[in-house]
Image (tube, grey):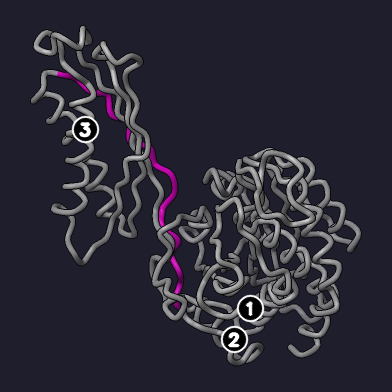
Amino acid sequence: MERILDEAKNLQAELVEMRRTLHRQPEIGMALPKTMALTKQKLEELGLEPKVMGESGLVVTIGQGEPCFLIRGDMDALPIKEESGEPFASENENMHACGHDFHTTMLYGAAKLLKEHESELKGTVKLMFQPGEEILQGAKAMVDDGVLENPKVNAAAMIHVFPGLPVKSGMVLVPEAGPFASTSDWFEINIQGKGGHAATPELTINPLTVMSHIHLALHALEAREISMYDSAVISTTIMKGGVVDNAIPDTAYMRGSIRTFDQEVRKFIFKRIPEIAEGVAQAFGATVDVQMIEGCPTVEVDHDVTEAIRESLSQAFPGDIASPVEAGMHKLGGSEDFSYVTQEVPSSMLLLTSGHSDEYPYFVHHPKVIFDEAVLSKGAAVYTIIAMDWLAKNN
């Protein structure tokens, strides 16, 4: 472990350079031609043979034989205009506001370390460079394309960097077993009323009134129909209707987000939202068309994989391993499409703090967020150690 930690520290300058290159040219969605090309080139320079999976995913294996441990890094950015003030800020309208440039770079660093120690591996490490996490499509697409096969993956893990937490930078937060990151789903409701002059509301069916009552009823669903021992968030995020102040519109539209950690609660909400919307609409004489849209399931943290990782990291980084609870983060309300991997193989999700909130006050997805680059080499070491140790313990 000491050798790996020293070698990782020696990669710091190279990792900073790579991260800043990626940060200047952020790409979004499933098409990441520049990001993929740079990452593929650097992997090939290590003597590796990365395979393109889908439009912009990359998969590379190091070592041979069984078992196989997968480590994943996502590569896409967000359609946010950067306001960080960093000298290497984005040169386009997108931004790596969620740290995926860190994840890609740290996973590359792990590839370099693992390649140097390939003869010591007690099996195979598969590295998954993934597009489309922010749109919750990339992991599922790669799973559907066979990323967990040839060789068959036996366990997996990922790291997510987080600035803005009230703990020192460079802490590795290891969760407990169970659901950790929430589902992410949506609802869309189109309301058909009867438009007319604003001076004669008695001749109309105002879809804005219907929309308002549906909005309030959905919050009652969240507050009064779901047990205090469960949890869910239903947030109306878009409400549209009307174009002029003297006309009642014919239609209205609303959309919102649904988050929960429990599959049964998820099913219940998917059943109740259409029932509530249709009932409210009927009461006012309107009609609705309700669409329930599945995003991604929960990230399921496996006990055995996670405890093995916790043991390895506690030896490698004594004093720098903690629970997310100690950082004020019992679970993640945000979603993570690595969930599609966790549904198939025993997996874990680690958090790497990248800036104490006193110095790094902004959280991910903020246009002014900045990240502590000092943790890049540590992230590469974490990826490497958990993979090598898990293979050694499960050979």
| Amino acid at pointer 3 | Ser
Q: Indicate the secondary structure of the residue bearing disc 3.
A: helix
**Where, by quadrant of the figure, is residue 123 drawn?**
bottom right
| Amino acid at pointer 1 | Gly
Which residue appears at 13% of the width and 9% of the height? 200
Asked if marks 3 and 2 touch (Cβ < 8 Å), the reply is no
Say if 86 sits above or below 318 in the image: above
In the image, residue 65 lies in the stretch drawn in magenta? no
- Please indicate whether residue 149 sits to the left or right of residue 340 in the image: right
Q: Indicate the secondary structure of the residue bearing disc 1.
A: loop
Indicate the quadrant containing the N terminus: top left, top right, bottom left or bottom right.
bottom right
Say if 303 sits above or below 25 in the image: below
In the image, residue 290 lies in the stretch drawn in magenta? yes
Q: Indicate the secondary structure of the residue bearing disc 2.
A: loop
- The residues bearing labels 3 and 2 have C-alpha atoms spaced at a distance of 49 Å
Report the magenta stretch's main SS. strand
Among numbered discs 3 and 2, the one appearing first in the sequence: 3
Asked if marks 2 and 1 touch (Cβ < 8 Å), the reply is yes
Among numbered discs 1 and 3, the one appearing first in the sequence: 1
- The residues bearing labels 1 and 3 have C-alpha atoms spaced at a distance of 46 Å
Of residues 97 and 107, the one nearer the viewer is: 97
Q: Which residue is mark 3?
A: 212
Res 170 label: 1
Q: Which residue is mark 2?
A: 320
User: The magenta stretch spans which residues?
Assistant: 286-303
Which residue appears at 24% of the width and 17% of the height? 192
Residue 170 appearing in the image? yes
